[in-house]
Image (cartoon, rainbow, N blue to C red):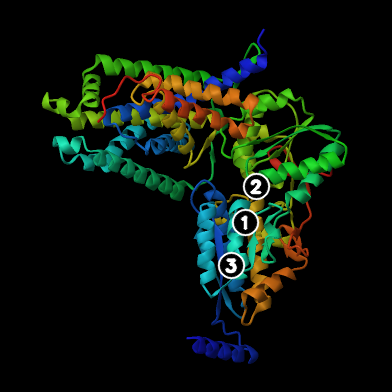
Amino acid sequence: MTALKTASLAALMTAALAGTALAADTVKIGYQLPLTGETAQYGQDFRKAAEIALAEFNAAGKPFKAEIVFEDSRSDAKEGTNIARKFVDDKEIVGVLGDFTSGVSMASAQVYKDAGMPQLSQTASHPDYTKISKYQFRNIATQAQEGPYNAKWMLSKGYKNIAVIAEQTDWGQSVVSGFTDGVKANGGTVVFSEFFNRGLKDYRSLISKLERAKPDAIYTGFFYEDGAQFLRQVQQLGIKTPVYSTSAAYSPKLIELAGEAAEGVHLTSNFLPTDPAPHIQHFVTEWKAASNGAVPGQFPAQAYDAVRIMLAAVEKAYPNPTREKVRDALAQTKDFAGVTGKTSFSADREAEKELVKVEVKGGAFVPVAD
Amino acid sequence: MIDPYYLQQLAIGLSLGMTYALMAIGFTLIFGVLNVVNFAHGEVYTLGAFAGLVLISATAPPIFAVIFIALAIGAMAGFSLERIAFKPFRRFTDEASLKSRAMRESTLLSSLAVSIVVREALEIVFGSQMRSVPFEYLINTPVRIGPVILVTGDFIIFGVAAAMLIGLQYLLTRTRIGLSIRAVSNNPLGAKYVGIDTDRTIIMTFVVGSMMGAAAGILTGLYYGAIFPAMGFVPGIKAFVAMVMGGLSSIPGAVICALILGISESMATTFVSSGWSDMVAYGFLILTLIFFPNGLFGARRERV
């Protein structure tokens, strides 16, 4: 078996050396993501984005074909570790993408750490994720970067007393701590800080409680579903306090679900579907074609980039890519021109990204200067 | 003078409790007859909401047509659910199998299976994203009463829940079908012996209970403005808690306990972090189970 593989590989290398573009070899990467369950909408989007990236890669006449094995983790840490073991056992898989949440990504990371499998998550933004081992990478700005950035932004607008709420998850906690540190360092006060359970329907109790602290502005760590409910109920209760949020809420669905209530919300992002740059417009067009004309949000864009970064690393490690070579190639990623801006990995495997300030105006996300 | 803040929290709690009650009524009705939890009730709720949404996006119907289609889909869902998940386990009509715990518990699993299949099917057809409801159909225009702000939906849901409760009491105590539902619920074998068509009665219960579940789904969907395949899960759990607290087969008891749940959640938010407010509700459940094993409003039940 091994001899056969080596033989075919040798034949392939000869073919490559001979300059023929015979694409006989296939390199496999794994993608663990929630395809069912409460966070399925995100996983489905990631798969769609990954398929776009994969089709492009395979159509580009590279020396090998790539294949992605998708596994459904249901955003469940236990399921995530099972998948991780499965991927690790599959000797053909040289790199893994995912998972969606920080919690599941970190649980699976323990398996990848022991097996020496490079893991690149498009969304896990908990500060501790990349600290697990040299095999963990992420393609998202962490709350340790975004929190202080947003804190400075809000303080510069003259909001000194700020209320913070976030979902009760690893990620939500990093939102609150990252932001609170930023506010304190720059002379503001956090007058209220609380967590809520993801998927909460009724925020009115929480909003009433929050308003008792009389904040100048509200900073929120939520995703679009929770965000839309929150914003709607803020409007219902007749509250005019400005709301700021993180890039996690940046999705066209936020505006679709919240309608007028989303007007005036400020947030940061690193993907603007309205950006005229050709590679961004290309992705937006492909996405629209695959999803009935819907505009992609930030998360699918990050997944698209993550897949392309991984494929580029595999290509760099080619021929005969191993997990170790792919890891090293990932670590060398520099100024990768993706749809979410230029991405480089720092020495501690954090994606360094530029953030854009955005406000909801007239039913659309509009970039603002301050 | 009470702080208006607490009045507002009380109002929010009541309105929250009402949405749970809406779900708990149909849930308890079905439990009362078969003595078994119908895990698919949450999916009937979701189906009702999707039926309404599909109609809204296809044509621009008046609101009562939306409710009507939800009720119709609910009735159909209840009928098919009984056929698929419950009837096959009633093949044997001897006394031993009618009283058999294993028989009842297998419907627990079959209804759970149906609920999973329906939810995943909805995800395949509609996607798992939250779908928005056109704004003109939403029932959440703010209404200010003194220091308290509520929305129109709160009053509609209150009205519907009250109508359901009163209508159901009328049905159960004054009509033939109601009498047979109560007879079957009391003693299925006895009911059979005196000539009641138990199969038909059980089907009717499912149809009525599921119509209420579907109506709850579309109303809550219009109230919160978001409809998605997993929407039935949390209300299902809350309705279950309300039912257990209320004494399993007491519908008014379930409604009162749903309101207690809602109020304790909103009030608890004042004193503990919102993330912990569910704990208060479940704490109540545990206390009830320890000190009132028959529920707050349950009569002493025969052990089956």
Amino acid type shown at disc 1? Met
Residue B191 can be seen, yes or no: yes
Q: Which residue is mark 1?
A: A106
In percent of width and height, residue B203 lies at: 25, 32
Residue in view at x 65 percent, y 47 percent? A170
- The residue sitting at 55% across, 66% down in the picture is A30
Q: Could you tell me which residue is drawn at 77 percent across and 25 percent down?
A: A214
Q: Give how far across and how far down residue A334 sits, in percent.
A: 77, 68
User: In the image, is B260 to the left or to the right of B294?
Assistant: right
Of the image marks 3 and 1, the number of the one nearer the N terminus? 3
Residue occupied by mark 3: A54
Of the numbered discs 2 and 1, the one sitting upstream in the chain is: 1
**Mark 3: which secondary structure?**
helix
| Label 1 element class | helix
Question: Label 2: which residue?
Answer: A170
Q: In the image shown, does A316 or A54 lie closer to the viewer?
A: A316
Q: Are the two marked residues, 2 and 1, in contact with CB atoms closer than 8 angstroms?
A: yes
Same chain check for tags 2 and 1: yes
C-alpha span from label 3 to label 1 = 25 Å
